[in-house]
Image: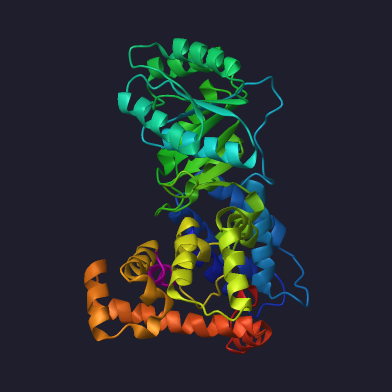
Amino acid sequence: MFENLTGRLSEAARSLSGKGRLTEGNIKDTLRQVRLALLEADVALPVVKSFIDRIRDQAIGEEVSKSLTPGQAFVKVIHAELVRILGGEHAPLEFKAQPPVVILLAGLQGAGKTTTAAKLAKRLIEKDKKRVMLVSADVYRPAAILQLETLAGEVGALHCPSSSEDKPVRIVDRALDDARRSHADVLIVDTAGRLHVDDEMMDEVVAVHARAKATETLFIVDSMAGQDAVNAAMAFDRSLPLTGVVLTKADGDAKGGVALSVREVTGKPIRFLGVGEKVDALEAFHPDRMASRILGMGDVLTLVEEIEDKVSKEKTQKLARKLQKGRGFDLSDLRDQLEQMMNMGGMAAMLEKLPIPGNVNPAALKDSANEQQLRRQVAIINSMTPGERRFPKTINGSRKKRIAAGSGLQIQDVNRLLKQFTQMEKMMRKMSRGGMKKMMRGMSARGLPPGMR
């Protein structure tokens, strides 16, 4: 989401190389670059102005310690200000109210409220061990009611049926009653999308909120909506007692300005980021981690949490035992690794959370390792026989032709996968013989950045 902003801010920091200390004179051009970077990222003008003023005040006279370059000292100031503007610290949901705790989702049409309701339900069920019920109060879009019912079944949540013939307030009354009788801990209410300039629709959501007595009222906003999203957030905040914001479609081509603007303009914390279409593609929002991501420092903590949640420990331990016994790494093992990587959003999503050095283009890395490429590789392996997966050296020219036809790809694609497998097999063999330390030393010698060693 922040690729362009990350590049521009890094470039601005590098322009300070060679300076002994940060002064108004030598940071003037750098601040201008930061201002342009923020404006290009669709950050609201008042937010840009206050952001630049605070950075100037903090940076001027900042002593550059022996362990920091002037550019690094400037990045440190920007990081601290980004953390502040993004909310300071993670704000978890409030569950101290009498069950069922009601979470009401509101926002513009097409912002992703229905899918966010399901993602949030899945997260609360799996991470917080809550019994969750979903209900749709969107009587204007019958497909939304059916969609939520389907998603509820997919994520293992309870569902309160509703109909386009009902009044939203009556739907909420019935859902509250059903939630109590079902002993649900949380009731998530999905409301209809509405324009903030439509007074009648805004009055309706205010009435629904009052009847639901919502503990949490989350504003769902599309990260790609730009300044319109900021104006809508302000309007919704005037009508409803918002308690937080969820940014959706953060994995798309959004410039990222909404994340910086909405928090500053409304004063409400960003609770979650929607980072994909799958029902598990919802991340808790941590201002300090996001600030590090914006500045190209990566977000290793979130990556570690994702690995713990989404990587199969059983398959990992099975592979480790297999290697310890001297049985070789085969194509079935490679397929397991690729599928687990896809569960985490592909290599692109992982790279976004790793610190990438300034001379490496993150976009190029992502393009070379996207989810589509992973799917193709899995398709090739699925087109092989069990014997071919176990003994890849038996795959000759005629077999390659058959495998390529079965996967709908070219022989060159099969050759490329087999070459990649051979490299991984060698690496796994070294690891099984205790060669991990030697391999890491070799990687260090080839000049990988400290954050990726």
- In the rendered view, does 367 fall on the left or right side of 319? left
**Whole-percent x, y for residue 33 in the image:** 51, 64
Residue 58: image location, x then y, percent:
71, 57
Which residue lies at the image location 33% right of the left edge and 16% below the top edge? 164
Q: Residue at x 40, y 53 (%)?
A: 252
Q: Which residues are magenta?
A: 363-370
At a point 46% along the width and 54% down the height, the residue shown is 41
Q: How many marks?
A: 0
Question: In terms of image quadrants, where is residue 62?
Answer: bottom right
In depth, the one of 399 and 186 nearer the eye is 399
Q: Quadrant of residue 441?
A: bottom right
> Residue at position x 50%, y 39% from top?
119
- The answer to whether residue 54 shows anywhere in this view is no
Report if residue 272 lies within the magenta region. Answer: no
Asked whether residue 193 is in view, the answer is yes
Name above or below for residue 242 compared with residue 37: above
Return the x and y of residue 442 as percentages of the image width and height: 61, 88
